[in-house]
Amino acid sequence: HELNELDVGVVLNVKFNRERVKVSPIYFLSSNVDSAKMMCADYSNPKETKYAAPVHVYFNSKVSKKIIDLVKGENIRKYMKTFTEIQNDFLVLEQRVFSFYGGRTSFNDLYVNTQNRSDELAQRAQQLIGLCLALEEDPAIRYSTNGRDAKTFAELFNSSFNDTKSSLKQWSPNPQSSVLLILDRRDDPLTPFMHSLSFQPMVFDLLHDDILENGAKIRGLKEDGGGGGGDGNTRPMPDESDQIWIKYRHDFIGEVVQKLPKQFNDWQKENNVAQLKRKTKDKESSSNVKTKDLISAARDMPQYQKLVKQFTTNIGMASKVMNIFKNSSLRDVIQLEQDMATGIDEDAKKVDRTQMQKQFSELLVNENVDQQIKLRAFMLYVISQGGMKPEQRKTLLKQSNFDSDTEDVIVNLGALGVSLTAQKPGQQSGGNKTYWKKVAEIAKKKSETTSIIRHTSYLEWVLTSQLSEKLSEDDFKWINKPSASKKSGAPKSYRKHKKNQNDDENGLLAQGSGGAKGPRYIVYFLGGVSYEELKVCYEFSQQNDVDIFVGSTLIYSPQEYLQCFRKDDGVEEQKNDE
């Protein structure tokens, strides 16, 4: 509707066959040669051009010399009035989440078949420039020292961003400082494998097979909100327009299944449409229904139908997730994961490794446990326990009935710096050593709560350390530090601050840069980021009154993370719609 108000009649994909019409076109394209060729083809025949003149062309990132040379030699140049770059080559997925849509191809180029690593890092640096320009941020830069890629990426971004800023004479960033934190999946290969007890991560984990069309739809939910509908019954997945989803997606699943149905019932008692339905259901004659009730009900009908769908979809997902959790004995699995990942049990004592290994072996030989859960536990064990002896690995693989492809998945953990062969049993393999030491300390404190979740992700540790100014330069080096007049911890914000507004008004590209009083962090995770880590950013932002925006080339569930280690799956290409 907004485009229609600007006299844009229709939006079409340049990849598809289109009708020939006499209108002046606006091309908005990704900066690749294929897109440019399709555009040029529309005007290749001067007697039958696809559209009229003038032609306006906008590329969503830096235009290569190859594209410029192509356009120079084509007929479309005669009709062209506008040819420019707009730095916005990214997707906004959620209020605080962005994506560079690289998919598993990006993971593969970074860690597996690394001949394209340089191009991969350069492309993502350019996309990150577009994000910072859109956010009006000129951030100080810190990168993880655990591997070379974060440093290379930080230097690439800094150099390219300086060049870009020098060419934008009118661009003015926000006066308060922000910090760009660059993390690498090598820093924390463990967290994405772990089960969560929060609503959104559980939905994308336990209902993974029911989520269709690249996350657009979900199947198997009953119309009344139950979790046992037929597979043919599909409905749209909740998104940022779903206020119920936004409210509950990061909550503990036990609270969701209790609070959400109650809120639905309370809402129905107050809603005009629901009240009218009850009256007619009670066989009250239509003559007794007051005109003002009918008018109120008619006015509320569209919103009523929308909210009913939102409530029943979310209730259905929560119910289905909870049933799977109860029927699959996942609590025992999660307890074992927490023991392995932290080395601390629920009584705040050091884990008995002999007992833990026994539980791990029992899990692998249990025929009632899904093979994927066994594989995730195996990967967690290898990472958290520093690998295993070759003869032990051989025995456990045989007991688990893993095929050769699954064994390759385990071996491919080495791409993230994980050692498969135990050097020091019980000492974590891969990742940041300082972080691993803190995990056990924090787990002891968390064991005093009622939650069985004791593990702290690397991202949570980094954010906490950064905010408290305890993040060591040995672990995170600065490319450029905030200036003395722009301290990241300053209590006053010079951004336009709007109080008492919902997060959906203070999202990634909200006017005035959001509502937080504290600093702003932009978190970029090389190699992908998990839904559990997204939740960490939302919660940290709310608890500490800071703006945090997080993104990567791939947002993955545990299943999608596993796929990154499978042969041939790393070369899947996810292209942006031109």
Image (cartoon, helix red, strand yellow):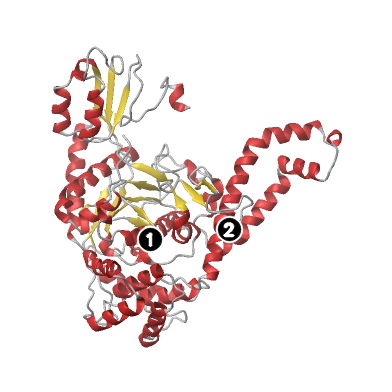
Residue 319, compared with residue 56, is above or below; it is below
Q: Marks 1/2: CA distance?
A: 22 Å
Amino acid bearing label 2: Gly
Q: Residue 47: x percent and y percent?
A: 24, 12
* 268 vs 373, nearest the viewer: 373
Residue 278, compared with residue 49, is above or below; it is below
Is 449 positioned to the left or the right of 342 in the image?
right
Q: Secondary structure at mark 1?
A: helix
Marking on residue 427: none
* 230 vs 113, nearest the viewer: 230
Is 348 positioned to the left or the right of 254 in the image?
left
Is 557 positioned to the left or the right of 392 in the image?
right
Residue at the outermost top position: 47
Amino acid bearing label 1: Gln
Q: Secondary structure at mark 2?
A: loop
Assign the C terminus to one quadrant of the image: top left
Q: Does residue 38 show up?
A: yes
Q: Which one is earlier in the sequence, the residue at label 1 or at label 2?
A: 2
Is 320 positioned to the left or the right of 492 in the image?
right
Q: Residue 37: x percent and y percent?
A: 21, 29
Q: Residue at x 43, y 66 (%)?
A: 195
Marking on residue 228: 2
Residue 85, compared with residue 313, is above or below; it is above
Q: Which residue is mark 1?
A: 559
Q: Nearer the viewer, mark 1 or mark 2?
A: 2
Q: Residue at x 24, y 56 (%)?
A: 143
Q: In which quadrant of the rendered view does residue 25 lie?
A: top left
Crowding near pointer 1: few (<14 within 10 Å), some, many (20+)?
Answer: some
